[in-house]
Image (tube, rainbow, N blue to C red):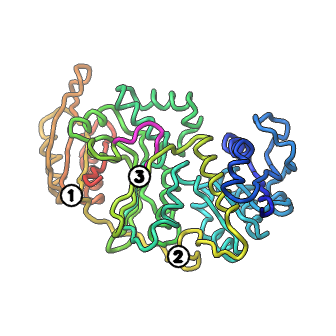
Amino acid sequence: MAEALRVGIAGLGTVGASVARVLREKAAELTRQCGRDIVVAAVSARDARRDRGVDLSAAKWFDDAVKMAETADIDVFVELIGGDEGPAHASVKAALEAGRHVVTANKALLAKHGVALAEIAEKKGVLLNYEAAVAGGIPVIKTMREAMAGNQVTRVFGILNGTCNYILTRMEAEGISFDACLKDAQRLGYAEADPTFDIEGHDTAHKLSILTSLAFGTRIAANDIYMEGISNITQADIRAAAELGYRIKLLGVAQRTESGIEQRVHPTMVPTASVIAQVHGVTNAVAIETDILGELLLSGPGAGGNATASAVVGDIADIAKSRPGFQHAPVFGWPARELRPYKKAQMRSHAGGYFIRLTVHDRIGVFAAIAKRMADNDISLESIVQQGAGPETEAQKTVILVTHETTEAAVRKAVEGVTKDGHLTDKPQVIRIERAE
């Protein structure tokens, strides 16, 4: 049997402790599968005295993760610290430069430094594995990097944030407000005390940028993603979507166009009969469209200690199965130095149209002014519905528009015009309708 694979874990929070526990509890099974033992030889965290529910007495303790990466007697450095700078970045870089394999669940780190770190890994001939960084326990990275040779990806999209999907699911199922759902998500541990990173789309954008690089062979461009969160979604939007035969989901979408690559994160109306609309709660789902395979949908637990730990342990096991001299797959599917510069796609028509909700003053001329703004921007309307806003606000009306295909720029310009006309009493809502999903 080959020598044991020695693992060092930096970060012993929920995921780190779960990884250590799984490696200990499943030791015999992992040895049979990998052909060698996997042992936790070193650990690093902020508090050595804290009880993490797993026996780590056999592992060497390091207060400094960078020092562990540089000097510990380990083969694999597992980074579960978090953050795109500081000790997370410094320790991963140090481990790779020292010729150690790295496993990370850190999507923010990869979104910012992934290509540079991949160049180091490939130069040193070591693995940089990151299955847990995107969609938790769903094996989407391995699928795209290793199992789709010969396929040309045309589009990848999905539900990549469990917090947002939980909130939207509860809002629809129970008719409660966004704020009430968010508080419950925080109480249950699905949302952080400061939920901005999740609910405003940043988390989804980081994950999407990694999938975009894998799908299209481009350098990661997390700063070139159109991003919109779900904090502006109301019960009025949820009800209107249901009446129109749609369900609202926060989607990350990346697709190849004639002019470049389009990346966007935003609330989206998808047909209630579509597969993606049936993904509820904290579950994630990723759809990959290719020329050979067609459409592949992967769905499963997207977050949580066990789901993330499962992906991390899977990455460690892959390293344990590898042998010296074996040619590793490039980190992002293509050699890092051959990744093409990201070319942002030009604004184009959106085949699914748009849902626009406007709360307006109930007075003569408002409808005509709205219609004129739409016509001035070459927007054709599929339907227009006026709803009362309730007896306590009789001076207001809600106007719901559904457009035919048009451009994002045209819709935004038209809505901006209506706003300037002074007809709105509340912030307008604009949601894409994805008919193909």
Horizontal relation, residue 273 to residue 163: left or right: left
Residue under pointer 1? 405
> How far across and down, in percent of the image, does residue 176 sit?
38, 26
Q: Is residue 12 visible?
A: no
Q: Quadrant of residue 188?
A: top right
The amino acid type of the residue labelled 3 equals Gly
Q: Quadrant of residue 406?
A: bottom left
> Mark 2 or 1 closer to N-term?
2
> How far across and down, in percent of the image, does residue 216 sit?
44, 70
Q: Nearer the viewer, residue 205 or 216?
A: 216
The amino acid type of the residue labelled 2 equals Leu
Q: Nearer the viewer, residue 255 or 19?
A: 19
Say whether marks 2 and 1 touch (CB < 8 Å): no
Residue under pointer 2? 339
Q: Residue at x 28, y 56 (%)?
A: 413
Q: Quadrant of residue 95?
A: bottom right
Q: Residue at x 37, y 38 (%)?
A: 233
Which stretch is magenta?
278-285
Mark 3 packing: few (<14 Cα in 10 Å), some, or many (20+)?
many
The amino acid type of the residue labelled 1 equals Glu
From the image, state whether disc 1 or disc 3 is nearer to you.
Answer: 3
Element on which disc 1 rests = loop
Element on which disc 2 rests = loop
Say whether marks 2 and 3 touch (CB < 8 Å): no
Q: Is residue 161 visible?
A: yes
> How far across and down, in percent of the image, does residue 155 sit?
37, 63
Residue at mark 2 to residue at mark 1: CA–CA distance = 33 Å
Residue under pointer 3? 158
Disc number for residue 355: none
